[in-house]
Amino acid sequence: MKITAAVVDHQGADFKIRDDVELCPMGPDDLQIHMVATGICHSDEALRVGDATIDYPIVLGHEGSGIVEKVGPEVTQFKPGDHVVLSFYACGQCANCLRGIPTQCLNYAHNNLSGVRPDGSSHFTIDGKHVADMFDQSSFTTTTVVRERNAVKVPKELDLRALGPLGCGYVTGSGTVLNTLQPHPGDTIAVFGTGAVGLAAMMAGRISGCTKVIAVDIVDSRLALAKELGATDTINSKETDPVKAIRDLTGGYGVDWAVDTTGVTAVMESSIQALAQGGTTATIAVTAHHIDVDTWNDLCTSDRKIVGVNMGDSIPQIDVPRLIKFYQMGMFDFDKTEKFYPFDQINEANADSRSGKTIKPVLVIDPDYVPGK
């Protein structure tokens, strides 16, 4: 079937809305999704500009939300009319998936970042020629087909337009804290970078009972929002040495936990130096930058740790409903970071994301969607 999609024709090209994209046929465990909305993530931009190896042309997008239109004969968990959030695909059969760690799926790269579907077929074509996909989802489309394991059912009474980013940005930041670091009540945490991922990590620190939840950024308006969302303290690192400020806020000790979402070398190094004895920092940005670590002082004698985390070590079918419950309780106000744009303003929305003007742009693909219907 022909669909409308935002296509990147070559490395660095703008998005082009096209209505001649052919969608692949459904497989036995597939869902056909009518797309309502999708977030724009920095990972989409990284692939658009070629920071990671990928084929072009490509249809990007991986924070989609929509309504199930059709299901394959082997689908057991969904039916037409269900509202869903889409996330990454894990095979469910490798050793890591069977251990309950789908973010470490041994087939993760092929299934999500190879540009083809898990079975090697094309997700999209134009005039019979292959068009690459992302996350076996490609949510910058009016309709897509995904595997059953890509989807998470969500309550119909909630606004689907707001929920898509739960499938990546919000689950990555919150999962890094709730699943990987697992701070105890009374611990302290600093989050470097208050974009969507950082604010999600910060709110998860508050949910975990940290007595100090410190937000670090260089934009005062973002720090003000961080304060509104639960930061106990904020630091503008453009004006103040963040390591010294964090030590001053923690009685000279430093924080038990830190999360870097910036991928900036100096900031990542500050997140390590701001740790207390025995502290851990998680670096979770998609970045080409490297860090210089003094293994004797920064790690060995201080017993500090650096961990990398993919997608918040999440199981979307567990983590997304958990975040929705926190949202309904007023503890995870992720929607305050979002701004809606019409689908045909995708390039403007992406530019606003790059510049930091908008924390989380959300493209409304179906303008006729009515929340709660």
Image: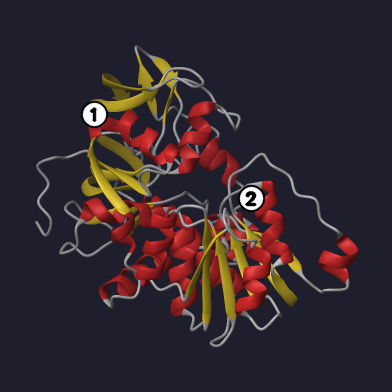
Q: Is residue 133 visible?
A: yes
Where is mark 1, residue-wise? 344
Quarter of the image that includes the C terminus? bottom left
Task: Tell me the residue at 30%/23% (across/down).
Answer: 22
The x and y percentages for residue 161 are 23, 51
Which secondary structure lies at badge 2?
A: loop
Quarter of the image that includes the N terminus? top left
Q: Nearer the viewer, residue 248 or 282?
A: 248
Q: Nearer the viewer, residue 50 or 69?
A: 50
The x and y percentages for residue 62 are 40, 43
Where is 23 relative to 67, above or below? Answer: above
- The residue type indicated by label 1 comes to Asp
The x and y percentages for residue 334 are 34, 62
Task: Tell me the residue at 24%/27% (across/down).
Answer: 3
Distance (Cα) linking label 2 and label 1? 37 Å
If you read the primary sequence from the N terminus, does the residue marked by circle 2 or circle 1 appear first? 2
Q: Nearer the viewer, residue 113 or 215?
A: 215
Where is mark 2, residue-wise? 106
Query: Farthest residue toward the bottom?
Result: 186
The x and y percentages for residue 63 are 37, 47
Q: Give the class, few, some or many, for how many residues have Cα within 10 Å of label 1's Cα (few <14, many ≥20).
A: some
Using residue 164 as the reference point, say whether residue 236 is left or right of it: right
Where is 85 relative to 121, above or below? Answer: below
Which secondary structure lies at badge 1?
A: helix
Using residue 139 as the reference point, say whether residue 364 is left or right of it: left
- The residue type indicated by label 2 comes to Leu
Task: Tell me the residue at 37%/62% (across/down).
Answer: 225
Mark nearest the camera among 2 and 1 is 1
Q: Nearer the viewer, residue 57 or 97?
A: 57
Query: Farthest residue toward the top?
Result: 127
Where is 172 relative to 330, above or below? Answer: above
